[in-house]
Image (cartoon, rainbow, N blue to C red):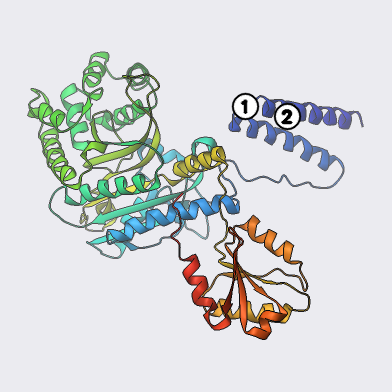
């Protein structure tokens, strides 16, 4: 009993600690961690009573979505899918898990984040880490050499989650890819155009798309004196420059990865530069880079890319940034990443990036890794970071306290008197058969006030009211919930009138 009393005291103290954190408005991660501890203590109490108590929570790095949150997500997905279709993409789907060997060795240092599954009948399986590697496997397996596709699905990463910043262990990716042999930079430019169209349509704030090329990076590492064996690991360090300072990146390169300090300094001279097509032209004249074949090829393609971006009218959204590295091993050419900008607080300050919201690039060798004869299919694509976007949109809606409709119901079928359930059922059935989104309350004799109140709460714009007099006259009283205006509509004209009144385009977000 003494042990139980001690456990109860621990539960009380931990509960007080959690309440204190909530009052202090501590971070969601910290609160979640302490709540998990509290639930474990409570579970122990349950076990002491001789019965198992389940801890009711979602696994770390995952979450449930309420109807309100799902309504927002569906609108965001709709904007993205409409854009993908506008550019002529087909849709595919692939299994949520792949053979482990399919995913192994494709993600560099991030391979440790892959979720492995238990052996299932002789097959070693892993949950997919992204949608790109499964797409490459799909192309090789089906011997496809030309396709423009989009794919929206969940992926899984054993990462340290940061829920408030939209970083989860289970999350959606929205990918668009163009596979096939085409003239240089035309598909790449379209991918950047799509990225800008989607981010502009979602109206989440000012953004900047950083571009670079893996060939420029590799050429830069070579002329700076990085050993070939360290290219990918140094690339991974450079990729952190959007999150930490150059000094921290340099310390990692030298202290952890064994790079000579003078080599790191030479890299620093390059990776801290960013600009537009003028920087591309400047680097083409660089005494060291101009002697490296890979770098010159990459710079030549970027110069051509900027010409197309000007024609697409999006060059003002694009910045050539030598620090952009994109840590994934499969990129071979142009790479890009969109960041949301935090507007400057002081006049004259540069906008600060507050997080990646889309990314992509060219990966010409990935399909060849799966083809028995090593046949390559050039590919370029992009991925929209929808979880980050959802977080931004949700925070904005909470701040504005804007009401979000969670259903698309056009009309509620109501009655003004008792004993009209049969008539309501007949009318709602007629409306459903005509393709009208309609509801009725599940009571035999609901009060009219309650029916009208339900419409206001659910955001239903119209009420079709049946009364004894209306039945005699062959009409339905159609009421606008917002204006409270009522008109009698002949029963045979009701469907057309509802369509006319509710044919309003949905707002985006």
Query: Where is residue 296 shown, x and y percent of the image?
Result: 10, 34
Q: 305 or 335, which is in the foreground?
A: 305
Which residue, given by chain and number where applicable, does mark 2 sit on?
19
Q: Is residue 441 left or right of residue 250?
A: right
Which residue, given by chain and number where applicable, does mark 1 sit on?
26
Query: Where is residue 211 shown, x and y percent of the image?
Result: 25, 37
Image mark count? 2
Q: 264 or 410, which is in the foreground?
A: 410
Query: Where is residue 389 shown, x and y percent of the image?
Result: 44, 43
User: What secondary structure is found at the residue carrying circle 1?
Assistant: loop
- What residue do we see at 41% from left, 41% from top? 204
- What residue do we see at 27% from left, 42% from top? 331
Q: Is residue 55 left or right of residue 279?
A: right
Q: Which quarter of the rendered picture does the N terminus lie within?
A: top right
Q: Please report contact status of discs 2 and 1: CB closer than 8 Å, yes or no.
A: no
Residue 53: which numbered mark, if any? none
- What residue do we see at 27% from left, 14% from top? 261
Q: 457 or 326, which is in the foreground?
A: 457
């Amino acid at each position: 009993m003494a042990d139980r009393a001690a456990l109860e005291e621990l539960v009380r103290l931990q509960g007080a600690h959690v309440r204190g954190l909530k009052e202090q408005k501590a971070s969601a991660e910290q609160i979640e961690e302490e709540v998990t501890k509290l639930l474990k203590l409570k579970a122990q109490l349950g076990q002491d009573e001789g019965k198992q108590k389940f801890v009711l929570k979602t696994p770390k790095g995952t979450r449930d979505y309420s109807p309100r949150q799902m309504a927002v997500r569906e609108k965001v997905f709709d904007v993205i899918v409409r854009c993908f279709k506008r550019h002529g993409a087909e849709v595919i789907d692939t299994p949520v898990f792949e053979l482990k060997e399919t995913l192994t060795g494709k993600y560099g240092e991030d391979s440790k984040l892959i979720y492995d599954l238990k052996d299932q009948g002789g097959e070693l399986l892993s949950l997919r880490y992204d949608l790109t590697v499964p797409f490459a496997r799909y192309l090789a397996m089906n011997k496809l050499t030309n396709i423009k596709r989009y794919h929206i699905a969940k992926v899984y990463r054993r990462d340290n989650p940061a829920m408030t910043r939209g970083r989860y262990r289970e999350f959606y990716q929205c990918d668009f890819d163009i596979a096939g042999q085409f003239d240089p930079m035309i598909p790449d430019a379209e991918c950047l155009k799509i990225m800008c169209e989607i981010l502009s349509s979602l109206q989440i704030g000012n953004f900047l798309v950083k571009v670079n090329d893996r060939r420029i990076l590799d050429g830069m590492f070579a002329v700076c004196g990085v050993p070939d064996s360290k290219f990918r690991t140094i690339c991974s360090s450079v990729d952190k420059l959007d999150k930490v300072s150059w000094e921290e990146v340099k310390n990692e390169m030298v202290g952890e990865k064994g790079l000579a300090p003078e080599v790191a300094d030479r890299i620093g001279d390059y990776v801290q530069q960013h600009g537009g097509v003028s920087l591309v032209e400047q680097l083409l004249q660089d005494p060291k880079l101009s002697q490296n074949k890979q770098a010159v090829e990459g710079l030549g393609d970027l110069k051509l890319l900027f010409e197309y971006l000007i024609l697409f009218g999006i060059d003002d959204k694009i910045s050539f940034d030598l620090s952009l590295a994109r840590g994934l091993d499969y990129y071979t050419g142009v790479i890009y990443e969109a960041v949301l900008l935090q507007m400057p607080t002081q006049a004259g300050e540069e906008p600060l990036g507050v997080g990646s919201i889309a990314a992509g690039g060219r990966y010409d060798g990935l399909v060849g890794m799966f083809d028995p004869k090593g046949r390559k299919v050039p590919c370029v694509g992009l991925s929209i970071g929808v979880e980050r976007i959802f977080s931004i949109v949700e925070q904005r809606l909470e701040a504005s306290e804007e009401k979000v409709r969670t259903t698309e119901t056009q009309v509620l079928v109501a009655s003004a008197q008792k004993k009209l359930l049969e008539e309501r059922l007949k009318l709602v059935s007629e409306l459903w058969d005509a393709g009208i989104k309609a509801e009725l309350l599940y009571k035999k004799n609901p009060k009219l006030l309650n029916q009208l109140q339900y419409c206001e709460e659910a955001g239903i714009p119209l009420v079709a009211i049946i009364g004894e007099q209306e039945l005699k006259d062959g009409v339905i009283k159609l009421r606008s919930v917002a204006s409270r205006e009522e008109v009698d509509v002949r029963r045979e004209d009701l469907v057309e009138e509802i369509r006319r009144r509710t044919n309003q385009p949905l707002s985006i977000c």
